[in-house]
Amino acid sequence: MILLDADQPVDPRVDEIYLKVRFYYQKYQPPTPPNKLPSHLNLHRFFFETEAWTSEYDILPCPKTTPPDQCVQILTSHFQVKDMLDCNPNKDPSKCTVGKNGVQLIYAGGHCHAPSCISMELYNADTGELLCEQIPTYGKGNQIDKFDELGYCFIPPCLWGYEDGLIPPTTLYLETNILSIKRNNNTIGHYGEMAHWQMRGVFL
């Protein structure tokens, strides 16, 4: 799209950009009886909005006399695993049979806006287990690491798996109760804040 005034000519020059892409893959190995799983499981999209499906919500300013480190607005949401699925077996059991044996999270990323986002937490409300905690980190300007840009905000995702360094996935069921907690610094109020959980998981 080009947005110019009527008397402004469109620049005729064109940039040519070249991309070189390398794909790595692992060959699929089917399951072998009696208990061996296949080498790969299909990842499905799980999603929930802590702000109750409004997509955005307001950060209300705290009283001006409150010290900034005490200005925290908390948003919570209670839901079940079935509410995270695009296909809900309880709403349409004739067309949707996924997840009846449970699901496992493989990736979870909380979507919130810097710089006021303090944290996002996802709990199994039935057991009290903290499933995922998202805390923004800021680059320190390490000259050795080109990705450590000074002041750059990054929110590392939660990952599960069976490789070294990863936590094994926890099985959750359709009726498992979930608690989401979002914390924002509200020294200064603003509009358009988000608290989405963008996730990927497998059906068992």
Image (cartoon, grey):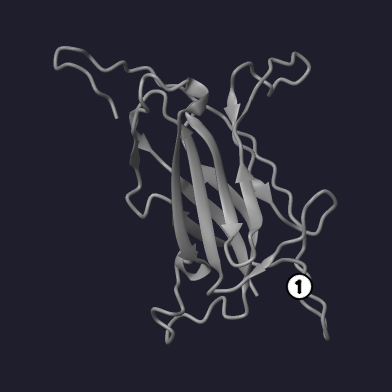
Residue closest to the eye, 98 or 155: 155
- The residue at the point 22 percent across, 14 percent down is 9
Q: Position of residue 81 (x, y in %)?
A: 52, 67
Left or right: 28 as drawn, with respect to 134 = right
- The residue at the point 53 percent across, 45 percent down is 110
- The residue at the point 62 percent across, 75 percent down is 102
Quadrant for the C terminus in the image: bottom right
The answer to whether residue 43 is visible is: no
Count the marks: how many?
A: 1
Q: Position of residue 121 (x, y in %)?
A: 57, 48
Tag 1 residue: 38
Left or right: 10 as drawn, with respect to 183 = left
Q: Position of residue 183 (x, y in %)?
A: 49, 39
> Label 1 sits on what residue type?
Pro
Left or right: 194 as drawn, with respect to 31 = left
Crowding near the residue tagged with mark 1, few <14, some 14–19, many ≥20 C-alpha atoms within 10 Å? few
In the depicted structure, whether residue 45 falls above or below residue 22: below
